[in-house]
Image (cartoon, helix red, strand yellow):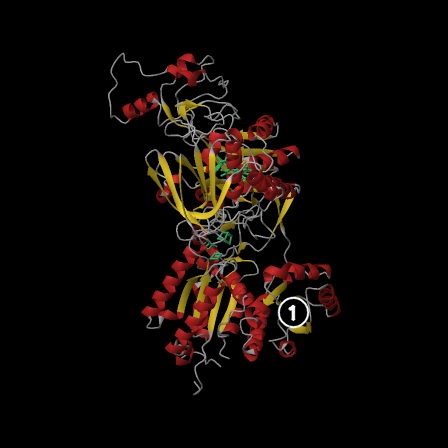
């Protein structure tokens, strides 16, 4: 039954609305309607007294519907609905007419037009409201389990916090070991901790936690469902080794004759075709890289009919021969597993742009490397045992140049933003070089030093004063080879002089970007990302861990490049968000969903074809459409395609919209 | 029509997640556009039944504009592709009946594109002003009931 006793509350919003819109006239005009029992204005409807005014009026005038004409519904729809509920009016009988953003502000130059437009928007809103039904939120049960994607320091922290609070947590990592980029580092600024020392205990905690189910060398294949109830398919990639049997002894690595670039060492060292990610990997398991294994390549060619196997020829099986527990089976053991979870945290981290992307800075030469590669050369457990050596000839360099801002703060050739951590890690690397070999000359080319963290500025001064690093304020434009050396050319922006130094090695602080796998993953999760692969938060200031998809959170460098402190904090923050969600046995869902009038439904299925959520099925017996309320998101795509108007979204019914349209389309 | 300069009526259907947010942002940024635009918020561009567009034109609007998220960005995954198909059909029907199909406009305007929102509203209003009043709304007066 259409509402007959509607209350209309027009907000001045200080002078924001009332400065342009003649609110008194609006209230009078609207008050003339027969279905409006009460119409008034107030300086701030969202204030306590404003809300009280609405509550009191609902009771006093026995209102059966309310329109609040104020700002965007994104701001105060909930405030006003709650106020109505306190006065005993069903909250779905409240609608917002946005006369601030949509009338007062864009037409502040034309008060008369703004006033008339406000009246029209309110009238259209009343027409829509009149047929609103009273609704109760829908309760959906919650799966009390969580999924964390990415096993870097942020993801590990999130998983540990969740698991410690008693929530069963699935951790999916695409590499064969957890640890992420932090595990590649030499030492960490500003404390100079050794990551291997401080991270290994955390990794082992994750590996052995009774509430954590770890899937490494795995990727998320598909995500279905919604907040509280996600169904996730996880692909465990083929390892060709039985991990239940593998003890991680490493015997196989000793005999494998194939050597390729190591992913973990970013090409600064070789690994064998059967390999373990690194010595402290969690889990400590071997896997075969299909693309380089002699045997697997041979078998593949035979399968494809490219070669015919000769009899009695022994194909390499050296690893399997020495494997005592007989773990190596050469069988493709790729597998898809399914897990149900209620919340998802994405912590997929970052990547750095490779040196090759900067040919003008010598990126094509072997001794011009990225800072992340250089971390491996400085790591005590790395391929050079912490003493920097040139990749080309293994020589300890006499001099090294560090270049800041390579590709960062450079909208033309790179990314527009500051990669935020480069100043600090470059200072750290320069310091570590000096510490290991005081005789190596170090030149540090920077534009500005950005050392804005706890203890960061002090760290910078230590590098300058205690270690004698040459800081040169200037942008390098060119690096090229001169004999055995690399000539670094630039301008000293403090003195204006051209600088030229010849060094043995160049380290580029290249820009950071989101994980290259993130776009594909984000599409599966339906969460937004930007052109550089950073995941987008709901609100940069106030909701940095949330995404527009309920139940999906982000943490760590996946959101934007950040240091370890911030990554860990975000990991804990996202875990707390997920816990808050999973603490409730049931979730409330907006009841603004599709509903079928089975009397007139023809069972044609045209609605079903439109639904992106598979929420509609056709009942085989009664031959009518049925909506699964847990899956429906209320978009209304189905209703626009229904030839009989049988399926409609509650409180967005066609009659409601058409009546509103009639008001809007009316000639002045 | 009076001799006064033509002041068109344009009904705008804006999806909740992108174009409504863009309209909010345009307002917050105090970007001006003509009050001829008369907005209604819908959850998604895909919920806009062709009937809504036709109805608006019939009831007096000189044009309609449907605003949704950019392809790939619809909050409901693929709603805007469905809207694109529906709008194409409406345009074909209008054209085949001899009406001006430019009076239905589909635009992708994301929540961060306040300036684009204002620009599109300005340009489209100017365009419709040049085009003159729509003859579609006088359909009824050709035979059926009289419109007031
Ligand atoms: C050269 C260099 C030096 C640095 N030095 C310091 C320092 O001294 N101090 C400091 O505080 N910070 C330092 N940092 C920053 C530090 O590395 C980061 O803060 C930290 O690693 C971020 O952690 P994270 O977990 O968010 O991301 P990451 O460490 O990048 O971890 C992300 C994880 O997710 C996995 N992953 C990615 N995509 C997927 C997918 N689709 N599915 C499953 N898993 C996926 C990755 O394999 C990885 O394991 C340095 C960075 C660089 C580049
Ligand atoms: S499109 Fe309409 S009539 Fe056809 S099955 Fe769906 S609800 Fe029923
Ligand atoms: S409103 Fe219709 S199309 Fe949209 S999710 Fe619900 S059932 Fe599916
Ligand atoms: S939500 Fe904007 S087009 Fe679907």
Per the image, the residue denoted by label 1 is A13
- Give the percent coordinates (x, y) of residue A79: 67, 60
Would you place residue A154 above or below residue A595 in this image? above
Would you place residue A49 above or below residue A529 in this image? below
Element class at badge 1: loop
- Give the percent coordinates (x, y) of residue A551: 57, 45
Tell whether circle 1 marks a residue whose Cβ is less than 8 angstroms from ligand 4.
no
At 54% from the left edge and 61% from the top edge, which residue is drawn?
A: A652
- Give the percent coordinates (x, y) of residue A306: 24, 26
Q: Nearer the viewer, residue A176 or B129?
A: A176
Q: Quadrant of residue A47?
A: bottom right
Q: Label 1 is found on which chain of the structure?
A: A
Q: Which residue lies furthest to the bottom in this view?
A: B3
At 41% from the left edge and 19% from the top edge, which residue is drawn?
A: A329
Can you see residue A604?
no
- Quarter of the image with the N terminus of chain A is bottom right
At 49% from the left edge and 72% from the top edge, which residue is drawn?
A: B33
Q: Nearer the viewer, residue A263 or A186?
A: A186
Can you see residue B96?
yes
Q: How busy is the neighbourhood of tag 1: few (under 14 within 10 Å), some, or many (20 plus)?
A: some
How many labels were placed on the picture?
1
- Give the percent coordinates (x, y) of residue A352: 45, 40
Would you place residue A542 above or below residue A311 in this image? below
């Amino acid at each position: 039954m259409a509402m007959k006793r509607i209350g209309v509350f027009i907000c001045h919003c200080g002078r924001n609305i009332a400065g342009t819109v003649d609110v008194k006239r609006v209230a009078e005009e609207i008050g003339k309607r027969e279905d409006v029992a009460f119409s008034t204005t107030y300086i701030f409807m969202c204030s306590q007294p404003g809300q009280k005014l609405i509550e009191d009026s609902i009771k006093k005038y026995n209102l059966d519907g309310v329109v609040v004409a104020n700002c965007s519904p994104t701001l105060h729809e909930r405030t006003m609905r709650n106020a109505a509920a306190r006065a005993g009016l069903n909250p779905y009988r409240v609608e917002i007419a946005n006369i601030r953003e949509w009338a007062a502000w864009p037409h502040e130059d034309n008060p008369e037009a703004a006033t008339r437009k406000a009246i029209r928007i309110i009238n259209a809103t009343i027409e829509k409201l009149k047929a609103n039904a009273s609704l109760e939120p829908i309760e959906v049960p919650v799966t009390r389990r969580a999924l964390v994607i990415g096993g870097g320091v942020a993801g590990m922290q999130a998983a540990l916090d969740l698991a410690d609070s008693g929530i069963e947590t699935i951790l999916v990592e695409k590499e064969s070991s957890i640890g992420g980029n932090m595990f590649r580092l030499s030492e960490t600024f500003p404390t100079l901790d050794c990551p291997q020392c401080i991270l290994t205990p955390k990794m082992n905690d994750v590996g052995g936690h009774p509430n954590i189910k770890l899937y490494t060398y795995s990727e998320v294949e598909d995500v279905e469902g919604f907040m509280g109830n996600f169904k996730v398919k996880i692909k465990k990639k083929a390892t060709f080794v039985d991990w239940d049997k593998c003890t991680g002894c490493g015997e196989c690595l000793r005999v494998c004759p194939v050597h390729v670039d190591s992913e973990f060492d970013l090409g600064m060292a070789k690994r064998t075709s059967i390999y373990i990610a690194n010595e402290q990997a969690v889990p400590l398991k071997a896997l075969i890289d299909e693309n380089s294994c002699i045997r697997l390549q041979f078998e593949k060619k035979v399968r494809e009919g490219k070669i015919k196997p000769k009899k009695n020829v022994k194909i390499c099986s050296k690893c399997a021969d020495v494997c005592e527990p007989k773990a190596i089976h050469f069988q493709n053991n790729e597998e898809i597993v399914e897990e149900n979870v209620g919340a998802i945290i994405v912590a997929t981290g970052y990547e750095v742009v490779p040196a090759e992307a900067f040919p003008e800075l010598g990126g094509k030469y072997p001794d011009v490397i990225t800072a992340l590669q250089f971390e491996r050369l400085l790591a005590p457990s790395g391929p050079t045992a912490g003493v920097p050596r040139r990749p080309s000839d293994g020589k300890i360099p006499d001099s090294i140049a560090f270049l800041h801002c390579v590709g960062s703060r450079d909208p033309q050739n790179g990314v527009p933003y500051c990669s935020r951590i480069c100043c600090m890690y470059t200072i750290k690397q320069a310091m570590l070089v000096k510490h290991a070999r005081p005789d190596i000359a170090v030149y540090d080319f920077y534009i500005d030093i950005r050392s804005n963290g706890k203890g960061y500025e002090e760290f910078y001064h230590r590098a300058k004063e205690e270690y004698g690093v040459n800081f040169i304020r200037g942008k390098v434009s060119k690096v090229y080879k001169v004999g055995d050396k690399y000539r670094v050319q630039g301008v000293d922006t403090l003195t204006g002089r051209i600088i030229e130094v010849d060094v043995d090695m160049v380290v580029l602080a290249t820009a950071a970007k989101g994980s290259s796998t993130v776009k594909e993953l984000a599409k599966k999760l339906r969460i937004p990302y930007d052109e550089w692969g950073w995941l987008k938060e709901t609100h940069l200031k106030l909701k940095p861990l949330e995404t527009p998809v309920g139940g999906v959170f982000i943490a760590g460098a996946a959101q934007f490049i950040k240091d370890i402190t911030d990554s860990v904090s975000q990991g804990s923050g996202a875990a707390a968000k997920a816990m808050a969600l999973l603490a409730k046995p049931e979730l409330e869902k907006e009841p603004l969903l599709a509903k079928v009038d089975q009397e007139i439904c023809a069972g044609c299925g045209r609605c079903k074809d439109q639904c992106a959520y598979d929420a509609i099925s056709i009942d085989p017996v009664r031959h009518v459409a049925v909506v699964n309320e847990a899956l429906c998101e209320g978009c209304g795509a189905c209703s626009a395609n229904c030839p009989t108007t049988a399926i409609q979204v509650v409180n967005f019914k066609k009659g409601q919209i058409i009546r509103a349209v009639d008001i809007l389309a009316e000639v002045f | 029509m009076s001799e006064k300069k033509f002041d068109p009526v344009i009904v705008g259907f804006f999806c909740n997640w992108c174009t409504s947010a863009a309209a909010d942002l345009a307002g917050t940024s105090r970007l001006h556009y003509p009050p001829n635009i008369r907005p209604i918020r819908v959850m998604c561009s895909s919920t806009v039944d062709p009937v809504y567009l036709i109805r608006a034109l019939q009831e007096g609007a000189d044009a309609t504009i449907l605003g949704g998220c950019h392809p790939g960005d619809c909050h409901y995954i693929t709603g805007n592709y469905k809207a694109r198909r529906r709008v194409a059909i409406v345009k074909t029907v209008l054209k085949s009946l001899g009406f001006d199909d430019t009076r239905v406009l589909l635009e992708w305007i994301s929540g961060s594109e306040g300036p684009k929102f204002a620009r599109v509203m300005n340009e489209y209003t100017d365009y419709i002003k040049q085009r003159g009043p729509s003859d579609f709304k006088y359909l009824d007066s050709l035979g059926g009931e009289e419109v007031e």
